[in-house]
Amino acid sequence: QLPLVESGGGLVQPGGSLRLSCAASGFTLDYYAIGWFRQAPGKEREGVSCLSTTDGSTYYADSVKGRFTISRDNTKNTLYLQMNSLKPEDTAIYYCIAGDVTIQDMCVRNEYDYWGQGTQVVVSS
């Protein structure tokens, strides 16, 4: 069993919202940087958003700035991705990730220690 399990994906119309959740098991999330990347068919993997555990700094891909928000609930050992104003180009499988790395290493260089199985997001009318 993978140590991270995503949920919350689905079909949504353009302009709609979804909140993805990712529950961790077997380790404590608050010791790690956390994040989300996505993979769309025929496209390269893209680091969407990452959150530092040391100073709370965040990274967002330019394509999602102002629309997506990453957060964590340490009491639930869960991370979230709130996605608003969704566009068809946001359609992808979204994966949560965690690692003892910087958020630049995680979101830009795709370095991480843990990952989930992914959850599908489809934005379509």
Image: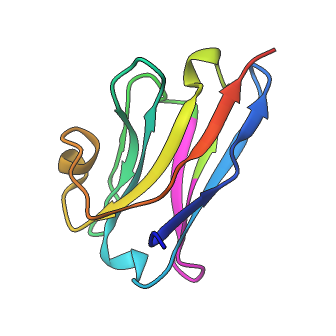
Q: Main secondary structure of the magenta part?
A: strand
- Count of numbered circles on the image: 0
Residue 120's place in the image compared with 67, above or below, is below
Frontmost residue, 41 versus 86: 41
In the rendered structure, the answer to whether residue 69 lies left or right of residue 96 reads: right
Position of residue 60 measured from the top left corner of the image (x, y, whole percent): 39, 37
The answer to whether residue 57 is left or right of residue 77 is: left
The residue positioned 77% from the left and 32% from the top of the image is 11
Q: Which residues are magenta?
A: 68-80
Say which quadrant the C terminus sits in.
Answer: top right
> Is 108 within the magenta?
no
Residue at horizontal 68 percent and vertical 28 percent from the top? 122
In this view, 69 is above or below 114: above
Q: Which residue is painted at 48% across and 73% down in the image? A: 1
- Residue closer to the observer: 34 or 91: 91
Where residue 106 appears, as percent x and y from the top left, is 25, 50
- The colour scheme used to paint the residues is rainbow
